Amino acid sequence: MIRWLVLLLVVLAAISLFIGDATLASPDALILWQLRVPRTLLGVLVGGGLGLSGAVLQGALRNPLADPGLLGITGTAGLGAVIAFYWGLAAVFPPALVVAGLLGAGVGAAFLLSFAGRAPSGPSLILAGVAVSAIAAALLALALTLAPNPFALAEITFWLMGGLADRPLWQVVLAAPTILFGAAILLSLGRGLDALSLGEDTARSLGVPITRTLRLAAVGTAFAVGTGAAVAGSIGFIGLVVPHLLRPWFGERPGALLPAAPLAGAALLLSADMLVRLAPLALPLSASPPVGVLTALLGAPFLVAIARRAVP
């Protein structure tokens, strides 16, 4: 099955290079390297980080509704990037956007772990994530309210909707190492997640360091998802949906999902991005909508279906 996912991702990435905004044609070299290649690479990196983080968090927290946004790290990364927008740092020094988003994710992870206590458990991490999300949402609302002018407000709002368009290649190169570093941390947690799926007491009896596993899950998510949010904005529901799509093929064991989750997440985000690029061909739209809007429209019904299935 992993081979089929790799093949699917390669095919989708190749098709993505030939799809523009409401067009389907072979691009010239300038458009290919300045627009299509960065967009495709960013979709693979961000989607892979979201899918892998979702699989890890659902296993670590033993909650089928867990996704990276649950811990609040996406919100704090977005807050850091908004601050770079707000103070004009991104206009003066373009890498400040990615750096500020990564710093926001790091601060969010630090607050998360401090709120969860010295020995975090699944429930305490969820409650801490709700607190961090609430603080980030309040500060984001404050930043939007105090935006210096309508143009800055429009730019910040559009960026927060999430998207892969018009991101230069240097932003992808800057974000790639931290996303891959976070993914490496998350991929190393398979044994601990399998033990945690049996309960924390059982995991302790098997010699699994629960506190270390949960902390590494939070830190890995901060790197893998926070950096992606700093570049692409808020793209929701990928981390929620991917583990549920994979379980019929790979089973319920969390560790078994980890190798496939980044591939499926990347394929899902690339598919969504191609759909929004082609949307003006089928719908009365003047421009392509942000991909974060599409993932929310598709993910919300999926969330309701999961919640209904979980009710006995």
Image: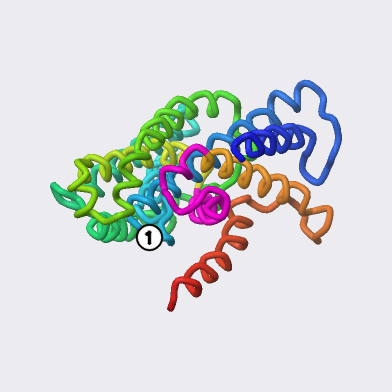
* Residue that sits furthest to the left in the current view: 118
Q: Is residue 117 left or right of residue 270?
A: left
List the single residue furthest toward the top. 29
Secondary structure mostly taken by the magenta-highlighted segment of the chain: helix
Q: Residues within 10 Å of mark 1 (few under 14, many from 20)?
A: some
Q: Quadrant of residue 4?
A: top right
* 127 with respect to 143 (left or right): left
Q: Helix or strand or loop: what does disc 1 sit on? A: loop
Residue nearer the viewer, 298 or 38: 298
Q: Residue at the spot x=76%, y=36% of the render?
A: 15
Quadrant that contains the N terminus: top right
* x, y percent for residue 30: 75, 22
Residue name at image x 19 percent, y 47 percent? 204
- Residue 194 or 278: which is nearer the viewer? 194
Judge whether 163 appears above or below 64 on screen. Answer: above
The quadrant of the rendering that contains the C terminus is: bottom left
**Can you give x and y, in whole percent of width and height, for residue 184 in the image?**
41, 30
- The answer, for residue 87, to whether it is visible in the render is no
Q: Is residue 149 left or right of residue 35?
A: left
Q: Residue furthest bottom?
A: 312
| Residue 143, magenta (yes or no) | no
Give the residues drawn in magenta, as a range. Answer: 234-259
The answer to if 235 sits in the magenta stretch is yes
Q: Which residue is mark 1?
A: 63
Could you tell me residue 167's position as x and y percent? 60, 34
* Amino acid at dot 1: Asn
